[in-house]
Image (cartoon, rainbow, N blue to C red):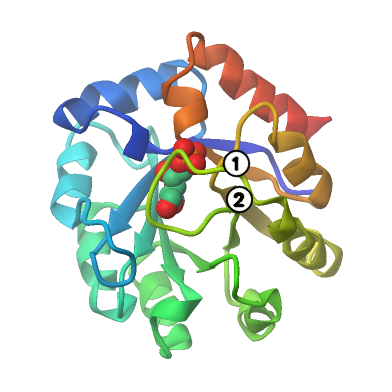
Amino acid sequence: MSEAKIAPSLLSGDFSNLEHEVGRMLEYGSDWLHVDIMDSQFVPSLTIGPIVVKAMRNHFTKEKAFFDCHLMVMNPEKWVDEFADAGANMFCFHYEATEKHMEVINRAHERGMLVSCAVKPNTPVEVLDPLVQHLDMALIMTVEPGKGGQSFRSECLPKVNYLRKRYPDLDIEVDGGLSPKTVDAASDAGANVIVAGTAVFKAENPTQVIAELRNSVLK
Ligand code: DX5
Ligand code: ZN
């Protein structure tokens, strides 16, 4: 079984002080930092790009801070090199955003990144079957991508179950509405990488929330 990894989403953090936000999340016990990239085309919102990933990378080595970059952008093939140059550890692109899936995967691997493919709630999970053998992770969205703070959609979990049954060693990430209340359903379905924005950043005790999320995966 794959290891538990907890990835707070910086989308709920203070964008004016990302060095501090990354540093404190690491102190609280997070494994990865989830970085949400939105282009106002694939999703309505506009967030940050590789220049900001690079700015964060200047303060933390690749070993110290694992940047799990979730690209909610059209034509992700255009961005592989820039994110590699910026120091991304994981390049996660959306299945729906391109037809050049293998081009993205191969180029991202050539450039030394891990690669994940994400599916939106209405995209059937079977589209990932031909790709999984080439992927390091799959991301099952449990909200419609585009903003933090939405309600968890448990109807997406059979997709996690489908992947876990077929691919026992695959890292399977869930993103959207995860909290100590919803994580058990996701971990029971087989998710081992948990993204949480609101639940961690708005918590009174983020260390405890991160520990609770981890314990749910390990139980
Ligand atoms: C949504 C993003 C998520 C978001 C999660 O489009 O991909 O990573 O930050 O936020 P919460 O945990 O608040 O749903
Ligand atoms: Zn995300």
Q: Tell me, yes or no, whether the two marked residues, 2 and 1, touch with CB atoms within 8 Å.
A: yes
- Mark 1, Cα crowd under 10 Å, few <14 / some 14-19 / many 20+, is many
Q: Earlier in the sequence, mark 2 or mark 1?
A: 2
Instruction: Please name the residue shown 67% across and 38% down the image.
Output: 4
Quadrant (top left, top right, bottom left, bottom right) of the C terminus: top right
Q: x, y (%) of residue 65?
A: 37, 35
Instruction: Please name the residue shown 26% across and 72% down the image.
Output: 41
Q: In which quarter of the image is residue 27?
A: top left
Residue 133 seen in the current view? no
Q: In this view, does 164 lie above or below 148?
A: below
Instruction: Please name the residue shown 54% across and 46% down the image.
Output: 176
Q: x, y (%) of residue 69?
A: 37, 54
Q: Is residue 122 above or below residue 36?
A: below
Q: Is residue 143 left or right of residue 171?
A: left
Q: In which quarter of the image is residue 137?
A: bottom right
The answer to whether the beta carbon of the residue marked 1 is less than 8 Å from any atom of ligand 1 is no
Q: Is residue 183 left or right of residue 175?
A: right
Marks 2/1: CA–CA distance: 6 Å
| Towards the viewer: 16 or 171 | 16
- Mark 2, Cα crowd under 10 Å, few <14 / some 14-19 / many 20+, is many
Residue 80 seen in the current view? yes
Q: x, y (%) of residue 148?
A: 41, 42
**Element type at marker 2?**
strand
Q: Residue 174 carries which label?
A: 2
Q: Which residue lies furthest to the top in this view?
A: 204
**Element type at marker 1?**
strand
Instruction: Please name the residue shown 23% across and 41% down the image.
Output: 57
**Amino acid under disc 2:** Val
**Amino acid under disc 1:** Ile
Q: Which mark is residue 194?
A: 1
